[in-house]
Image (cartoon, rainbow, N blue to C red):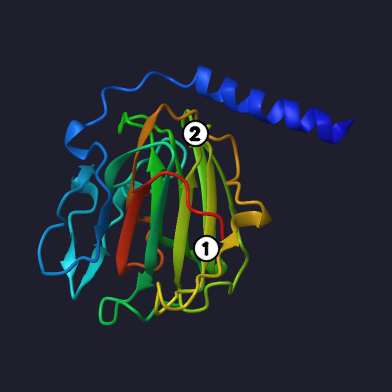
Amino acid sequence: MKSALRRITTPLLGALLIACAPAAPPFPEDAAGQPFSDDFEGEGPLQGYTTARAEVLPSVARADGRYRAELSDNANNKTLHFNKDQGRLDARPRRFPFEVIVRNVGIGSLKDSQSPPRPADAYVFAGLQVHAPDLEAPESAHLVVGHRGRTLFTVEGKNTRRGRSGVTDEGAGVAPEGRADLRIVGLEDRSLRAYWQLPNPQPGVTPDAWRAYGGDGLLPGRAPRFPEWVYVGLITYAQGDAGLPFVGTADAIELVDGLPKPE
């Protein structure tokens, strides 16, 4: 009986979430139907992104074939993504359903972006965010890698709805080099599933071994009620000043329409 009820209520819940989602502004037509990938070749500003709050984290660019965000000033927690605080986001619009993967994303030192800082207690992260079309509204979900206080070298998940965040992590030491591959799947019912793995040095050659965040892929807290499209992209942020300066980097990002093929 319980399994039968579950089969009935799950589709109804998805339909209810869609019905209750806020109306979205028109989808940017220049992005309609366009797959997007970026391996950050060249030097200089990021290309092809919509940027929110660039002033709080101005040192973001393509450097050494990577996305690179240098964070040295976090006055008044201006880079933070938590509750009503919203830092910088570099993103692309995407309709549901979609899949996004970012490769070898994480934290590093100013001298060596691939060598992580090792503070005793700091909140420093880089990773993926899915954000409502209104970039000023505190409605988002993210999956990031870095240090969460004294929980070092971890993967953090967070939902923020109406300016209230729920947050957990995967435990200390799960990302021992402060880096991971991150993946978020946006389903047809406009819910999200999150996955991560240690960096795959040869994607497309070596099979990925994704781990569902929290065991079921669900991010913590109350999930935002996303409309038919969202912004999806990269964030780097800190809470407080401990662990600064540092850099957030990523090797590549790929955004595709539709659901992934069964593995």
Q: Quadrant of residue 47?
A: bottom left
Residue 9 is situated, as x and y percent measured from the top left of the image, at: 72, 26
Residue 138 to residue 51: above or below: above
Q: Secondary structure at mark 1?
A: strand
Query: Which residue corresponds to mark 2?
Result: 190
Earlier-in-chain disc, 2 versus 1:
2
The front one of 62 and 173 is: 62
With 41 as the anchor, is 168 left or right in this view? right
Rendered image: mark on residue 196:
1
Q: Is residue 64 above or below residue 210?
A: below
Amino acid under disc 1: Trp
Residue 13 on image: x %, y %: 64, 25
Percent of width and height locating residue 168 = 60, 52
Count neighbours of disc 1 (C-alpha within 10 A) and say few if under 14, some if 14 to 19, many if 20 or more: many
Residue neighbourhood size for the residue with mark 2, other residues' Cα within 10 Å, grouped as few (<14), some (14–19), many (≥20):
many
Please tell me which residue is depicted at 40% across the width and 48% down the height of the picture. Answer: 129
Mark nearer the viewer, 2 or 1: 2
- Label 2 and label 1: CA atoms lie apart by 20 Å
Left or right, 56 with reference to 232: left
Q: Is residue 76 left or right of residue 154?
A: left
Which residue corresponds to the image point at 32% horizontal and 31% vertical from the top-left? Answer: 133
Q: Residue at x 39, y 79 (%)?
A: 202
Quadrant containing the C terminus is: bottom right
Foreground of the two, 226 or 14: 14
Foreground of the two, 76 or 116 = 116
